[in-house]
Each structure stands twice: as C-alpha cells, then as structure tokens.
Image (tube, rainbow, N blue to C red):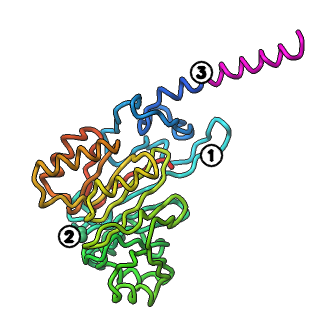
Amino acid sequence: MPRGSRGRLWAFALGAAGCMLLLCLGHQAPGLLGPTDSTDTAIPQPTVPPATRPAPVVDAEPVSTVPPEAAAQPSAAPDGSVDEEPIRLTIVYDNRPADPRLRTAWGFACWIDLGETVVLFDTGGDGATLLENLAALGFDPDEIDIVVLSHAHDDHTGGLQALLDANDQLEVYLPGAFPEYLKARARERAVLVEVDGRLQITEGVWSLGPMGTSPVEQALAIETSQGLVVVTGCAHPGVAAVAGSAREMGRIHLVLGGFHLGDQSAVEIDSVIRQLQLLEVERVAPSHCTGDLAIGMFAEAFGQAYIEAGVGMALQIPR
Ligand SMILES: [Zn+2]
Ligand SMILES: [Zn+2]
C-alpha cells in the first residue's frame, strides 16, 4: 500500500474513534453523575449546545452532586492522572435550618473549601454563633485563608471581628464602597483588598464585582466542571442581575444564597424565576432572605433541580 494511502487510512480510523468517543460523551448529562460509575468525574464534560442539553437532573439527596464513592477519594482517570478533590460548600450561618446540630440566626455565611484554600463568604450576624457552628462542623477559623464580604449589612459582617481575633492571617475582600469603619477594622488585623470590578480572588474563584447602589454588593462565581457556582449574600441588586453578570463568564450550574425576594409578590417572583430559567441556571439553592413564598415557588419551578438550603447544608461539586 502506498505510504499516502496508509496515512489516510490511519487518519480515517482515528477520526472514527474520535467520533465514537464524542458520541459516548454526548450521552452524559452535565451535572448528572451516574451513581454506579465513579470514573465519570474524570471525564471532561463536553459543552453541549443549550438547545440539545437534557433537562437538569439532580440526585434525590441534595447534599452532594457527586456519588459518595467518587467524592470520598481521588480516582484514577483513563489517562492515569488522579482526580482533584471536589469543591465543598457548607452553609455555616443561616436563619433557615438544615442541620439540627447548628444554631440558626438571621444572616448568612458559606464555607468554601477549595482544598488548598478555604474561602469564607460572609460572616453571619454574630461571632459567637458563627464560631459555635464552625466548631460543631469541625471547622477551625485558622483554616480560613480568605474572607469575602458581600455587602455591609450586619447580618453578613457581624462575625468578622470574631474571625479577625481568631485568625490574623486573613485576606479580606470587600467592595470599595464599604463604610470606612469596617475597612479600618479589617485593615487592623488582615490584608484588606477593596474590590472595584470583576476580580479573580483565588484560582477559579471570582468576585463578579460591586453591583447595585443601596447597598453595593458583590457575589462570587466559582468555576467547576459542572459550570459556575454563584454564591450570593442577599442579592440586593437582584438575583437575576447577579446571575446575568455571571452568565457572561459561562454556563451557571448553581445559584446559592440569599435571593432577597421576601417582600415580592408572586408575580414578581415568577418573573425572577423566568429570568433565571432564560439564563439557563441549572440548579438553585435559595436561602437566608429569599422568603417562604419565593422558596416554595422555586421548589415548584425547578423540581429536582431545587436544593433545600439552610445552615449546615453541604454540597460537593467536582471541579
Ligand atoms: Zn442585606
Ligand atoms: Zn442578609
């Protein structure tokens, strides 16, 4: 066989094998990890055009987006590399209950364990409750590297001083519009970073930048293999506006936190739900200031893609 023909034959064979592989991957729903196949997390999820993407399906058990055997320990990928640990998010301060070992109180804080780095997003309303909840979960304030404050309301900044007292190695990221007394408090014992635009805080973790005016608020977008995980404090600028800003960065797997819809009518809440659906938000975990009516409507609208959130709720998301 002439050398050129043999080359073309090889190219054809390789192309056919590639197509087969893509077809196999194409059957994988993003966000859906088969409970029997722990190697799924090692396969890069293909980007499927929105029109053909299957409806999001989630585990019945909302504490994990990966099967426990896949999340528990790194597994070998087909190419021999070892999977990275999943990103673990735990709500450590919230007025909505989830884990009976923890105290509920008005406010919000979310512990984000990235393996090499721990980010605490907001600090709840008071330090004693925050520290008590961290202890009950086996979390040590010394493990925290970075504190991100969403906005200057007391129910998100009240635990800051207790953290600064417990850990003098913190970096604190807050919108530049924060009141001077809070900046001064942070500056005394931590490295203060004033956020004035979209900013990568640590690898794969972004501040969407200050939004809104009363108050100015920042939300986080965390890159994962499933898409972006957006964490909001109160979402005063509007949760749809926050999600819209994150959507500029990529597909949104999950929006978690306070959606600030407690004083909204069913018509207004319905409009917000539609906007999030138009933005192709796959899953929602509304909590804190979302309000009972809105929480019920989100549960109804998102079905299995709704995650009941509250203090102590933990999620693991493959990176
Ligand atoms: Zn607020
Ligand atoms: Zn709040």
**Quadrant location, ligand no. 1:** bottom left
| Number of residues whose C-alpha sits closer than 10 Å to that of mark 2, classed few (under 14), some (14–19) or many (20 or more) | some
Viewer-nearest of discs 1 and 3: 3
Is residue 232 among the parts visible in the rendering? yes
Residue type, label 1: Val
Location of mark 3 (residue): 20
Which stretch did the figure color magenta? 1-20
Give the prevailing secondary structure in the magenta stretch: helix
Q: Position of residue 222 (x, y in %)?
A: 45, 56
Q: Position of residue 107 (x, y in %)?
A: 24, 69
Residue 180, compared with residue 21, is above or below; it is below
Reading the image, the residue beneath label 1 is 82
Residue type at mark 3: give it: Met
Q: State the image quarter where residue 30 is shown.
A: top left
Q: Position of residue 92 (x, y in %)?
A: 32, 65
Residue placed furthest toward the right: 2
> Where the N terminus falls, by quadrant?
top right
Q: Which mark is residue 106?
A: 2
Judging depth in this view, the residue of 171 and 162 nearest the camera is 171
Is residue 127 highlighted in magenta? no
